[in-house]
Image: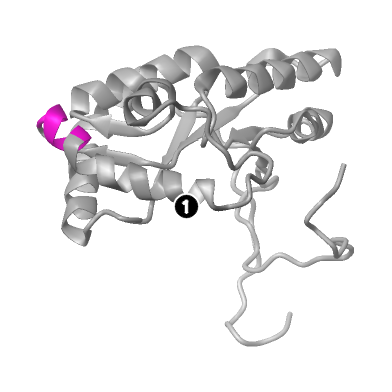
């Protein structure tokens, strides 16, 4: 399996020192089965990109991850999954969100079409409406976004999500207003319905030293 990492992480150091006795290592997953197999092999959680393909493709990979996890003799309850929702735009009125996000999608689709169709970087959607229906974008009212995250949770069994942290082709005002509405109305509902994962271990005692001085 080709890798973009060229330099082996031999005797690599981590700074600052982690507070956990064992830090949680996430394995990113886009479209390759080998990525989720490695996560299961090492007993680590997996984070689905959940980007340009419909939910069905990413659900297949997560099922494969859990299958390999169980085959390794591990408890399925410990198989932790996260998922990305990179394109997010929440407004009070769903029609406003859908209308405002259309040009954002069109620029995104044009960029992907001109990218050379690298593996995992093409879309299979018939158009904007199909993209909103079958893709991972969270575009709409708070109620619609809560419902869609819930549907993805049913498909993935994920315990956490990541939303887009960059405005992209949204204006700064649109981006900030969307984040504020998400935090005010969407996030509290999701915290009530999807429990947070446990921390990987107790906080470790670490030796503090002044910054800039070798240990």
Where does the image place residue 133, in percent across and percent down from the top left? 36, 21
Q: Is residue 46 visible?
A: yes
Spot occupied by residue 42 in the image (x, y as percentages of width and height) = 81, 34
Task: Give me the residue at 67% from left, 33% from top.
Answer: 31
Nearer-the-camera pick, 127 or 192: 127
What is the quadrant of the N terminus in the image? top right
Of 185 and 112, the residue lying toward us: 112
Measured along the vertical axis of the image, is residue 78 above or below residue 113?
above
Color scheme of the displayed model: one colour
Magenta: main secondary structure equals helix
On screen, residue 202 versus residue 174, left or right, reads right
Q: Report the magenta residues as a range.
A: 93-98
Name the spot of residue 124 as percent of width and height, x first. Answer: 53, 28
The residue that appears at 63% across and 57% down in the rendered structure is: 18
| Residue indicated by mark 1 | 111
Magenta span includes 138: no
Question: Can you give x and y, in whole percent of width and height, for residue 39 in the image?
Answer: 75, 33
In the orientation shown, which residue stands out farthest toward the bottom? 213
Q: Residue at 61% across / 71% down in the picture?
A: 208
> Would you identify the image quadrant in which residue 34 lies?
top right
Front residue (pair 16, 215):
16
Characterize the local packing of mark 1: few (<14), some (14-19) or many (20 or more) Cα atoms within 10 angstroms.
few
Please state, as top left, top right, bottom left or bottom right, where the C terminus lies in the image: bottom right
Horizontal relation, residue 215 to residue 122: left or right? right
């Amino acid at each position: 399996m080709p890798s973009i990492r060229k330099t082996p992480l031999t005797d690599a150091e981590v700074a600052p020192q982690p507070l956990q006795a064992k830090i949680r290592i996430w394995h990113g997953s886009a479209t390759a089965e080998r990525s989720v197999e490695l996560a299961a092999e090492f007993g680590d959680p997996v984070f689905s990109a959940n980007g340009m393909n419909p939910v069905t493709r990413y659900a297949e990979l997560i099922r494969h991850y859990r299958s390999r996890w169980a085959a390794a003799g591990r408890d399925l309850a410990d198989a932790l999954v996260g998922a990305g929702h990179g394109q997010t735009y929440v407004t009070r009125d769903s029609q406003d969100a859908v209308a405002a996000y259309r040009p954002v999608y069109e620029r995104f689709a044009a960029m992907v079409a001109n990218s050379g169709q690298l593996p995992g970087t093409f879309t299979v959607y018939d158009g904007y409406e199909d993209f909103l229906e079958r893709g991972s974008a969270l575009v709409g009212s708070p109620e619609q976004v809560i419902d869609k995250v819930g549907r993805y949770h049913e498909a993935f069994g994920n315990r956490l999500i990541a939303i887009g942290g960059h405005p992209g082709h949204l204006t700064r005002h649109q981006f900030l207003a969307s984040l504020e509405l998400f935090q005010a109305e969407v996030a509290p509902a999701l915290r009530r319905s999807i429990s947070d994962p446990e921390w990987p271990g107790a906080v470790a005692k670490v030796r503090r030293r002044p910054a800039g001085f070798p240990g």
